[in-house]
Image: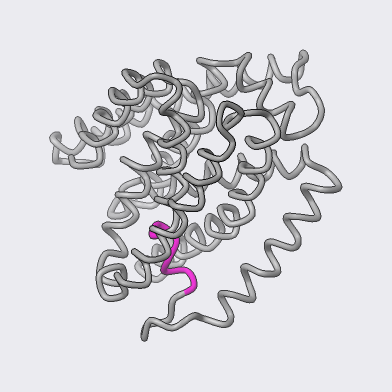
């Protein structure tokens, strides 16, 4: 319930704020990612894990090369992995395997597809900026139409799936209230700010609940890293002045974030699936 209320409040706040305040909100979104993925590189004793650092280093090098040689493939991989990561993290982990996979697809596809459905021109411009080539064309139109129809089908059948498998109707209503709020947020806000509202108030908070014991135990390191990240991000936006959201900065920030987000997404998705495999 906390995530639902926070996403709603952040969405309303972003909708009411002037555009000049959005860079600060984006900085908040960047900083929120620090505690969200902090446990990836921490050992049980609070030190830095060398295997994890090695994994991130290799992943960042490979992703950097992919963004350099084939930005369209890098963007496509980022979107696919984002769908799987967000969906698997936000889906109810106690559900049976079939229901879990069903909800994973509905939630993950919503976060990736909604901006394209509601703000197609702006998303195409962003994708063109990132991929350094236009994605507009018949293939995009047909693919988006098919994905939208598929999501609607999956969302409607998810309700039936939950109704059959779940005896707690309060939980069923809560799941679909979350989905409806996200649809409204992505419909009313611009893609980047809508994603920040979801990421800060929904995804990160939901994930933090799962790793709260580790975050609490190593809170000094996590809070310090978070504060440092926020100060750097806010400083960059402030120093950029009126050009804080210009094309060059957006592309640089997006690619830089993806270099950490993709390895984190793979890491966390693998953990979620491994935990389900162990419990099966």
**Picture layout, residue 140 above or below residue 256:** above
Q: Residue at x 75, y 55 (%)?
A: 64
Residue 72, placed above or below residue 19: below
| Horizontal and vertical percent position of residue 266 | 56, 58
Q: Look at the image and name its color scheme.
A: one colour
> Residue 168, how many percent across, how many down?
14, 40
Q: Using the rendered view, name the quadrant where residue 200 is placed.
A: top left
Of helix, strand and loop, which mostly describes the magenta segment?
helix
Was residue 23 drawn as part of the magenta stretch in this picture?
no
The residue positioned 57% from the left and 82% from the top of the image is 50
What residue do we see at 41% from left, 36% from top? Answer: 25
- Placement of 228 over or under 163, stated as above or below: below
User: Along the line of sight, which residue is nearer the eye, 111 or 129?
Assistant: 129
38 is within the stretch colored magenta = yes
Task: Tell me where residue 256 appears, x and y as whole percent.
Answer: 64, 50
Is 28 above or below relative to 33?
above
> x, y percentage for residue 122?
61, 18
Residue drawn 64% across and 76% down?
54
Q: Which residues are magenta?
A: 35-41
Q: Toward which corner of the image does residue 280 lie, by quadrant?
A: bottom left
Number of disc labels: 0
């Amino acid at each position: 319930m906390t995530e639902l209320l926070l996403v709603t409040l952040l969405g309303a706040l972003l909708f009411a704020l002037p555009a000049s305040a959005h860079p600060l909100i984006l900085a908040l979104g960047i900083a929120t990612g620090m505690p969200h993925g902090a446990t990836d590189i921490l050992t049980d004793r609070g030190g830095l894990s060398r295997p994890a650092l090695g994994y991130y280093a290799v992943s960042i090098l490979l992703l950097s090369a992919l963004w350099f040689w084939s930005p369209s493939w890098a963007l496509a991989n980022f979107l696919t992995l984002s769908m799987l990561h967000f969906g698997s993290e936000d889906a109810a982990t106690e559900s049976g395997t079939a229901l879990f996979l069903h909800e994973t697809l509905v939630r993950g596809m919503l976060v990736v597809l909604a901006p394209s459905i509601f703000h197609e021109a702006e998303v195409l411009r962003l994708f063109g900026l990132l991929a350094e080539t236009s994605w507009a064309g018949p293939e995009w139109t047909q693919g988006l139409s098919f994905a939208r129809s598929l999501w609607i089908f999956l969302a409607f059948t998810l309700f039936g799936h939950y109704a059959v498998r779940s005896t707690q109707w309060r939980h069923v209503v809560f799941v679909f209230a979350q989905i409806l709020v996200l649809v409204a947020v992505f419909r009313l806000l611009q893609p980047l700010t809508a994603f920040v509202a979801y990421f800060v108030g929904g995804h990160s908070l939901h994930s933090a609940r799962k790793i709260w014991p580790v975050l609490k135990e190593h809170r000094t390191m996590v809070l310090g890293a978070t504060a440092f990240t926020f100060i750097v991000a806010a400083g960059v936006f402030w120093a950029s002045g009126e050009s804080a959201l210009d094309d060059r900065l957006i592309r640089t920030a997006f690619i830089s974030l993806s270099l950490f987000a993709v390895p984190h997404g793979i890491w966390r998705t693998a953990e979620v699936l491994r935990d389900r495999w162990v419990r099966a």
